[in-house]
Image (tube, helix red, strand yellow):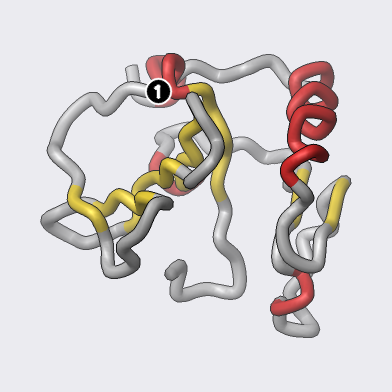
Amino acid sequence: MSASAFSLSEGYSSGAFRLTRGEPVIGGIHGATRHHHCDYCKSWLYTEPEGVADFVNVRSTMFDKVRTEPPFVETYVGEALPWAAARGRHRYETLPAMDEWPRLISEFAERNAAWGKEEFNP
């Protein structure tokens, strides 16, 4: 879905996320996990994953200000190209088990101050 060796995103609580303009559409993959895209250019904007209440996964490329630190969690490294590695702090062949997410989120929160949507797009 990213047309790249990488698919970068950042997780936020639904309450911390707000669209500032436009009306996204659901992309080519339909189902319980909702992948929202720009209706004009079809860029992947954000995802509301199935089974994860109050969570939005926002594509990192959508922000005006880009974070510069390496990824905290890498997923699907089992499908990565041999030369494509970001060396995130936590790496998973597919996805972490659902019961691992609270620990990962807590550890991330301790290391990083949350950035609000307005800070990226004033």
* Quarter holding residue 5: bottom right
Q: Position of residue 51 (x, y in %)?
A: 53, 41
Q: Position of residue 58 (x, y in %)?
A: 46, 40
User: As displayed, is residue 31 above or below residue 2?
Assistant: above
Q: Is residue 44 visible?
A: yes
User: As displayed, is residue 117 above or below residue 21?
Assistant: above
* Quarter holding residue 41: bottom left
117 or 37: nearer the viewer: 37
* Quarter holding residue 17: top left
User: As displayed, is residue 63 above or below residue 97?
Assistant: above
User: As displayed, is residue 63 above or below residue 27?
Assistant: above
| Horizontal arrangement in the rendering, residue 12 relative to residue 48 (left or right) | right
Q: Is residue 70 visible?
A: no
Q: Secondary structure at mark 1?
A: loop
State the residue at coordinates (84%, 29%): 103
- Return the residue at label 1: 17
112 or 55: nearer the viewer: 55
| Horizontal arrangement in the rendering, residue 47 relative to residue 104 (left or right) | left
Crowding near pointer 1: few (<14 within 10 Å), some, many (20+)? Answer: some
Q: Position of residue 31 (x, y in %)?
A: 35, 59
State the residue at coordinates (19%, 45%): 24
State the residue at coordinates (51%, 22%): 13
* Amino acid type of the residue tagged 1 in the rendering: Phe
Q: Position of residue 121 (x, y in %)?
A: 35, 24
State the residue at coordinates (41%, 35%): 64
Quadrant showing the N terminus: bottom left
